[in-house]
Image (spheres, rainbow, N blue to C red):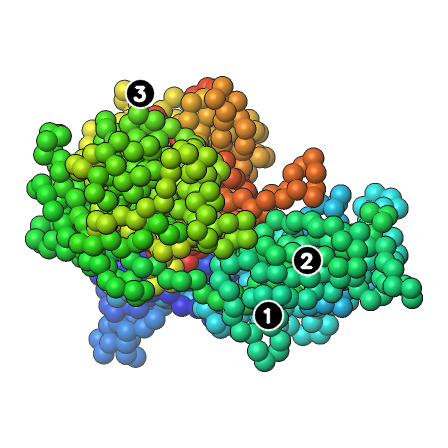
Amino acid sequence: MFDGDKGVGKCGNADGYYCGGGYVDRMYFEFAPTKLSGKYVLDATFRAHETWSFNCDPHWVDLERTDNISEGTHWPGPKQLDQMGDRYVSAGRGSLCSPDQPDAWIEFNDNPDEPDENLKNTVRSFADGKISRLTLMLRAKDETDARAWKRFDDSAELQVTFAYKPGVPTDVGLIPGNGTTAYCNKSSSDPLIVTRVDPMVQSRVQTLVESHKGDEEGSLQSEYVVERGDDAAWHQVWSGHMPDTGWHPDGTLEKMRTSNRADGGLYRYRSRTQSHWSYSGKSGDLWSSYSSWCYFKIDSSAPKPPRITPGSPYTECIADACEGKGGPGVPGSFTFQPNTADIDASGHTDITQYEYKLLSTPAKKISGTLKAEVKNVAPPLSGTQVLSVRAQDVRGRWGAPEEFVFKVSPAKAEVGRWHLNDGAPGSGIMLAKDTATEGNRHDATLVGAAGTGWSTRARGGESDYSLRLNDDTTDPAQQTGYAATSTPVINTQESFTVSAWVQLSDASTNRTVLSEPGTNSSSFQLYYSSAYKKWVFNRADKDQAGPVYIRSMADAENPALNVWTHLTGVFSTEGDDGLPDSDPTNDTIQLFVNGQPQGKPVVLSQAAPTYTPWAATGGLQFGRFKGSGTFSQYHFGLLDEVAVWQRTMSPAEVADEATVMRDGVPANELVAQWDATSAKGAEIPESTPYPLPSMKLSPSGTTVDEDDNALFLDGTKQYAASTGPVLDETGSFTVSASVYLDATTLDTKPVGYKAQAAAQRMGGESSWALWVVKVAEHQYQWKFTRTSVDLAGKVTQNAEASAGETTEAGNWVQITGVFNAQDAWQWTDPSDDSKTETRRGTLHLFVGQLDQTADTAQFSNSQQGGGELSLGRGTASGSTGNYLAGGLQELRMWAGAMTADQVRSQIIEGI
C-alpha cells in the first residue's frame, strides 16, 4: 500500500532550485494524478531534499498548496490556497555547524494536533479527480527573515499509502439451471426463467482502475443482494458474499448459490464489490456502486433446457478441444429438441416452439415440438461463440436456456491494405505500399498535381501520415491528383468489401474515395454526391458509356467538411442461406458510415432490371472515377487506412473496422485545441494543423487572465465561441476541457443552476455538451450529454453520463467526455420485450482520471451538430444560455474514443 511520485521543481518561468528576490525563497512542485488513479488515500507524506540553509538555527518552512503554474507565471507566483503543513528544521550546512548538519530529506505529514494541516485530504481529493494537478510550494514562514532562507533540490516525492477503490463488478448474472453460462435479463416483464429454487449468482470483483495489467490488486469480496417483488413491493429476501472468508484480488469470478427461494416468485438480483483495508492499527471497507438489476422468476415446472445438436459446419467445444469452423457470416445448422424430462412416457411433449440466439445477436423463434431445425445461425465475428436456446410450452411459459459453445474460424483476411503513411510531406515518395498478407500485393502509385502527396493530418494520430489529394488549389482543372494500382485488386463480380477513412474538404462537385474501372465505367464507386449531398456507394449495371447507377445512400445529408469519416461499401452475392451463389437476383450493395448501416441492403436487380454482374479490369483507384471512358470526380481532401476484402463483411466486422487500431489499442487523432495561454487580444487561436477558426471572446471586454492563463467568465453573459463542427459526431470522439468553478459567484446561483462548459450547437439543442449542475448548496455534478432531434427540431433521444459523486467549487478539474460509436448494446422494444436488436453508441464521463459511468449511457441516434462551438455557454430547449460561472484553460478534441488508460496517459499526464 505504498506509492511514490516525483514532482518537478519550478520557479517563475524557469525550472530551478529556488526563486525570488532578496531573502525571499519559494519553490513549486507539480504532480500529475495518474499514479493515484483509482486509489483511496489513507495517508500522504511530502518529502523535499534540503541542501543548504542560511545558518545552523532551525526556522519554519511552510508547505502550501497553490494554483497551478506555467511558463507564463511571474512573481509573486500563483495564488496560495491552503496550508499543507510546516516544519521547524535546518539542514545542509555540513561541518559549518556543530554537530554537522548534512543534506536531509524534510518530510511533511499531517499533525493530528494541528487541524490546519491538510495534506492527506488534499491528496485524497487529488486522487479522486477533484483537482486536475497538485501544485505545492515550499516557502519560509517569515519571508522577511534572511536567516530562514533555504535551498532544496529541484525534485521531491509525494509518498502515499492507499487502498484500491472498488469498481462495479462485471459478468453479473445468474446461472438458471445446471449450466455454466450466466444471464442477466434487465426487464421485469421478461425475467430469466430459473428452474432451480437455489440459483447460482455470480459477479467478477473489480478495482475501480487496473493500475498494472496482469497484477493481482486489491483485497476484494463480492456482495450479492436478492429482492422479491411479486408478493409485495420490492423487498430484500437474501444476501450473501464471496469469498466466505478472506479476500480475493481483482478479476476473480465469484459464484454462490442462494438459499431456497419460493417457486413461482419474481426476483431481482444485483451485486457490488467490497474493498478492505488495514493501516496503522485501523481498518475499513469501501463499496462500489451496485450493478444493474437482473430479473428472474423461479418456475421449477417450466420447460427444462432443451437439447442442441449441431449440423454443419460448427462443432461443440469440449474441455480439451475447441476447433474453429466456418467463419464470420458463415451460417450453421442446428437441431433443437425438448429436454428428456419434458417428454412423457408415450413420447409426447407440450413444447411448441424454441427461441434461439447467439449472445451477441437478437433472438429468433422457430415452431416445433419434438424437433426443430434451423439452418441460418450466422455468427457475426470469429472466436468463441455461445448459442443459447430455450423452449416454450403450450401454456406460453418459457423455460431455462441451454448453451452450445463453439468456435468460429478467423475470417479471410483483407486482400489489400494501404496505411498511406509511406512518406512525410515533401519527401517526394510517390508509392503507397500494400501491407496485406492475403494474395498478391498491389502497391499504389501517386500521380498528378502538386497537391498530391502526404499530410501530417492522419487518422492514426501522432507520427502518422495520410494521402493528400488536390486541396492546395481552387482551380478544378488542376485538381487531378490520385493514386492507383496497376491491376485490379478485387474481382467485382464476386462478393467484396471496400473501406477508407476520408476527410472531405470541398463539396462543390462529386468527390470519389475509391473505385475500380472497366473499359467505359467504374464497376463501383464509393464517393460524395453533390447532387444528393450524401455519401454514396454505387454499382454500374454494365460496363458501358451510359450505365445505370444503382445507389446505396447515407441516411443524412450535408456531411461535415474537414472531419474524419469512415466509409465502407459492401457488395454481397449471398443467397438466403448466407452463402455466395451465382444468382444475380441475390446481389446487394450497402453503404456503412462510421460502422453504421445506412438503410437496408439494395437489391441490384430490383433497382435496375438491366443489372449484370461484371468484373473490373483496371486497377483500384484512390480518389477518381471513370465514366464514359474518361476519369473525373477527383477527391479533394485526405484519404487514410484503405482496405479491401474479397468477401462480404458482416455489420459487426464493419463496426470493428471503423476503429483504427495501433499496437492493440484504439488510435485517436487530436483535431482541435484552444489553449488560453496562447490568447491574443480577444481571441484564443486554434493550434492544430487542421483548418479551424479561433475562439472569439464575447461580449466586448471579455479577456483572458494573464496571471492564471485562463478565461474567466461571469456566469451571466460572457463566453467564447468558434464555428463547428470539428468532428464527425456520428462517429467516435473525445472532448476534454480544463474547468474551474467560481465558488463566490456560484453561491449566488439557485439549486438547479446549470451551465455548459463546452458545447456544439445543433439547431435549438446541443449535439454534445459538458455540463455542470448545482445539485445542492456548495455541491456540483458534472455531466456529458448527447442529443438528437427530428426534422422539426423536437428531441428524439437524449443520453447523459453523470458523475457518481458531487464536487465542490474552487479547484481546476479536467472534464472529459467520450462517445464510442462502435460500442454495442442490446435494445429491447419497450412495447414488446421479445423484440430486440443490436444498437451501437455509448457515453462515458471522466472527472480527472476516473470513469464516472457505472451504468452505460446508451445513445444510438447520433447526429451531426453545426454552427456555434462554444466555451462557457450552450444551447438547450431552443434557447442559448447556460452561462458558466468560472474559468476555462483549454478545450481539446480528438477523432476516436479514448480508453480509460488513454485518458490518463494522453490527457491527465499531458496537462
Q: Three-letter amino acid code at disc 2?
A: Glu
Q: Which mark is residue 138?
A: none
**Residue 264 appears in the picture as rendered:** yes
Q: Three-letter amino acid code at disc 3?
A: Pro
For disc 2, the marked residue is 373
Q: In front: mark 2 or mark 1?
A: 2
Percent position of residue 534, x then y: 35, 31
For disc 3, the marked residue is 699
Element class at badge 3:
loop
Percent position of residue 748, x then y: 50, 26
In the depicted view, which residue is nearer to us: 420 or 883? 420
In the depicted view, which residue is nearer to us: 597 or 752? 597
In the depicted view, which residue is nearer to us: 829 or 522? 522
Q: CA distance from mark 2 to mark 1?
A: 16 Å
N-terminal of the pair, mark 2 or mark 1, is 1
Q: CA distance from mark 3 to mark 2?
A: 70 Å
Residue 259 horizontal side relative to residue 794, left or right: right
Q: Residue at x 83, y 52 (%)?
A: 393
For disc 1, the marked residue is 315
Within 10 Å of the Cα at label 2, are there few (<14), some (14-19), or many (20+) other Cα atoms?
A: some
Q: Three-letter amino acid code at disc 1?
A: Thr
Q: CA distance from mark 1 to mark 3?
A: 69 Å
Percent position of residue 116, x then y: 48, 52
